[in-house]
Amino acid sequence: MSAPASAAPSQDELKALVGRAALEHVVRGEIVGVGTGSTVNKFIDALATIKDEIKGAVSSSVASTERLRALGIEVFDSNAVDELAVYIDGADEIDGRGHMIKGGGAALTREKIVAAQSRRFVCIADASKRVEVLGAFPLPVEIIPMAARRLMRQFAALGGLAQVREKDGLPLVTDNGQHILDVTGLKIADPLAFESEVNQWPGVVTVGVFAHQKAQICLLATPEGVQTLRYD
């Protein structure tokens, strides 16, 4: 009688797998940039196992800061650190060139700031996040609230449907005190040009396309193990 086939790993198990794999990219003795989200939470848990080998972290959100501190990892203000060796964060989508959509956790502005401060961006994700063209996941855009209706019309002119993200029946408020538009219906064939254009629209704080701050490495969790993709 043949042995039963083992069950495929759950998404939660895949996130834990890739979170542990990211430890190989942490530079010992330095401060590490840490992103936001459920996959990053697994990385933070893994990071706690080597917390005595790093100086601490710069965090992209209040939620990640709280988790890091609860595990005994010192969190530095970004203004106290000139440069980070590596930033480790998840993605809602990533294409074949390392361009991403981010912001499902509403931390896109601070994520982009920490990414720009880092020499290397390592994306950690499961295989479902890999896409040919960005846009299947709703595009998050952090905005100043008074510009919401005009920005919704501008996205409509591009073929997108923008809606204000809500929480408990009210507009979600980011760590920066702003709102989020989630835009569906877009196909972002030229992420660099799209990011540059939308970031110039008055009222946009940050668009959730990460093309100028793209990933150099993606650790992709698959049922067969962690696949390393390089975009240098």
Image (spheres, grey):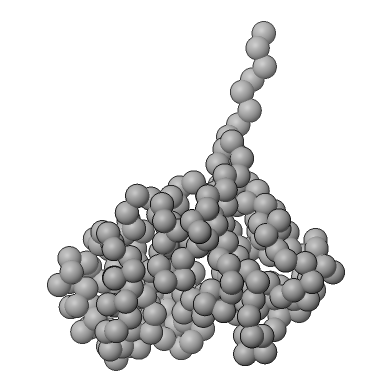
Residue 85 % position (x, y): 65, 71
Quadrant assignment for the N terminus:
top right
Residue 121 % position (x, y): 56, 66
Asked which quadrant contains residue 56, the reply is: bottom right
Q: Is residue 187 above or below residue 81?
A: above
> Nearest the camera: 102 or 11?
102
Check the image and name the residue furthest to the top: 1
Residue 23 % position (x, y): 71, 58
Instruction: Look at the image and tell me whether residue 124 can be seen.
Output: yes
Check the image and name the residue furthest to the left: 157
Instruction: Look at the image and tell me whether residue 77 can be seen.
Output: no
For this view, does 119 lie left or right of residue 187? right
For this view, does 31 lie left or right of residue 116? right
Residue 127 % position (x, y): 49, 46
Q: Is residue 10 above or below residue 156?
A: above
What residue lies at 27% left-to-right and 84% top-to-bottom? 201
Check the image and name the residue furthest to the front: 232
Please tell me how many numbered marks the rendered image carries.
Answer: 0
> Nearest the camera: 80 or 137?
80
Asked which quadrant contains residue 168, the reply is: bottom left
Asked which quadrant contains residue 153, the reply is: bottom left
What residue lies at 28% left-to-right and 89% top-to-bottom? 202
What residue lies at 57% left-to-right and 79% top-to-bottom? 117
> Nearest the camera: 140 or 89?
89
